[in-house]
Amino acid sequence: MRKILFTLIAFILVEIALFILVGNLIGVFNTLLLIILTSIIGIAVSKKLGMKSVQNLQHSINQGEPPGPLMVDTFLIFVGGILLALPGFLTDVIGFTLIFSFTRKLYKPSIYKWLRKKMESGNVYIINR
């Protein structure tokens, strides 16, 4: 729990430092405009990709294929959309890397490893209905 709290505080401090740096470089108004613009563009792109990902997931389930990789993609796009909606430059960079497929591939091995560890320890339950 302390690691999460420390990471969150460090993340917030980095975001504040980036606001100050960018504000000094391009001005306060341009910084605010950039934050709003990246949020609008990011939300629009993540909405489009998220809807497409959900449709692919539904198609996969209807075809009887295992939806595992598509579920991970959908989840990462969702998290990326949330990060893009939050104000900040670091959250925008991470959010954009989560919504685009060529950079999303970088996160997948970690997600799969985490899921495998949870399943092996018995912390994940799969319910068939």
Image: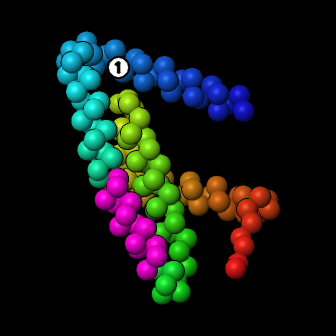
Q: Residues within 10 Å of mark 1 (few under 14, many from 20)?
A: many
Q: Position of residue 64 (x, y in %)?
A: 53, 86
Residue at the extreme top: 24
Q: Position of residue 20 (x, y in %)?
A: 34, 14
Amino acid type at image mark 1 = Phe
In reply to whether residue 51 is colored magenta, the answer given is yes
Q: Which of the image's four quarters has the N terminus?
A: top right
Q: Nearer the viewer, residue 48 or 80?
A: 48
Q: Is 40 situated above or below 109?
A: above
Residue 82 included in the magenta stretch of the image: no
Left or right relative to 25: residue 60: right
Answer above or below: position of 95 versus 71. Answer: above
Instruction: Tell me which residue sits at (53%, 74%) in the image.
Output: 67
**Image quarter of residue 104:** bottom left
Measuring from the top left, give residue 13's x and y in whole percent.
48, 19
Instruction: Check disc 1 and report the residue beneath it.
Output: 19
Q: Which residues are magenta?
A: 46-59
Q: Is residue 114 left or right of residue 91?
A: right
Q: Residue at x 31, y 45 (%)?
A: 42
**Residue at the extreme right of the image, as rendered:** 122
The residue most toward the front is: 129
Q: Tell me what residue is drawn at x 40 percent, y 66 percent.
A: 53
Q: Residue 26's x, y, as percent?
A: 19, 18
Quadrant where the C terminus sits is bottom right
Q: In the depicted view, which residue is nearer to us: 107 or 58?
A: 58
Residue 102 visible at all: no
Secondary structure mostly seen in magenta is helix
